[in-house]
Amino acid sequence: NAGVTQTPKFQVLKTGQSMTLQCAQDMNHNSMYWYRQDPGMGLRLIYYSASEGTTDKGEVPNGYNVSRLNKREFSLRLESAAPSQTSVYFCASRRTGTGYGYTFGSGTRLTVV
Amino acid sequence: SQQGEEDPQALSIQEGENATMNCSYKTSINNLQWYRQNSGRGLVHLILIRSNEREKHSGRLRVTLDTSKKSSSLLITASRAADTASYFCAPSQGGSEKLVFGKGTKLTVNP
């Protein structure tokens, strides 16, 4: 059981380049989330998808777009990367209903130079 | 969604000792969750306590919840070096449950 799989694990981008972070879960979860984690800042929610076909902004959505491609996959796109987007990005998923915890992926470490 | 505030920010203990960390929140909740993050890894869900529960156990973990004080505590008994990690609490009001994470408590267990 793979859980939540994120690709790539590491990426270096130049300012202005674009890229898509991929996330897939095999647990049949309805809800999926993208967070970023910066040193000393905890995790901040970028976007989430409560169910297939819906997406909503989180706390820090500027500079990002998302696509809920199907129930399994939720991708995060940086259209024009900036050094401020250097961070570790985590995808998570959760089963629908109250009282279930999140399952997190292992993260993508992104550096924008 | 609301953020929990973990306290202390850092805790250093010897192997075999107990570790206690606390979490405070501001508004009523449906449940509160605790997560662990080992260095450089994703968060791992440890335990969830519902608002109508006062205490819950899972192996060496004991979580308490005091809704009147809007606080929770996580006790790790007989700590091991492998417990070295950051611990986060996440209060949840249920429903869409967009969890908000604070800065966590960084626990170091010295061999």
Image: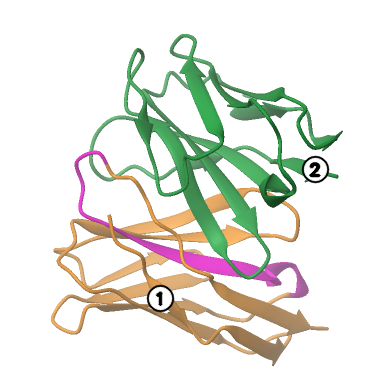
Chain colours: A green, B orange
Residue B55, position as x, y percentages in the image:
28, 72
Task: Determine whether the residue tagged by mark 1 lies in a helix, strand or loop.
Answer: strand
- Nearest the eye: B23 or A112: A112
Q: Is residue A102 above or below residue B16?
A: above
Q: Is residue B78 above or below residue A99?
A: below
State if disc 1 and disc 2 touch (CB < 8 Å). no
Q: Which dot, 2 or 1, sits closer to the camera?
A: 2
Which range is magenta?
A: B81-96
- Nearest the eye: B53 or B90: B90
Q: Residue at x 50, y 64 (%)?
A: B59
Q: Residue at x 36, y 23 (%)?
A: A30
Q: Please name the amino acid that badge 2 sits on.
A: Val
Q: Residue furthest top?
A: A70
Residue B95, position as x, y percentages in the image:
19, 41
Q: Is residue A53 rendered magenta in the image? A: no
- Say which residue label 1 marks: B5
Task: Determine whether the residue tagged by mark 2 lies in a helix, strand or loop.
Answer: strand
On the picture, is A106 further left or further right than B61?
A: right
What is the distance, in whole Å, between disc 2 and disc 1 at their CAs? 30 Å
Residue B19, position as x, y percentages in the image:
56, 85
Q: Is residue B93 rendered magenta in the image? A: yes
Q: How many marks on residues? A: 2
- Say which residue label 2 marks: A112
Q: Is residue B82 above or below residue A6?
A: below
Q: Please name the amino acid that badge 1 sits on.
A: Glu
Q: Residue at x 79, y 34 (%)?
A: A9
Residue B90, position as x, y percentages in the image:
38, 61
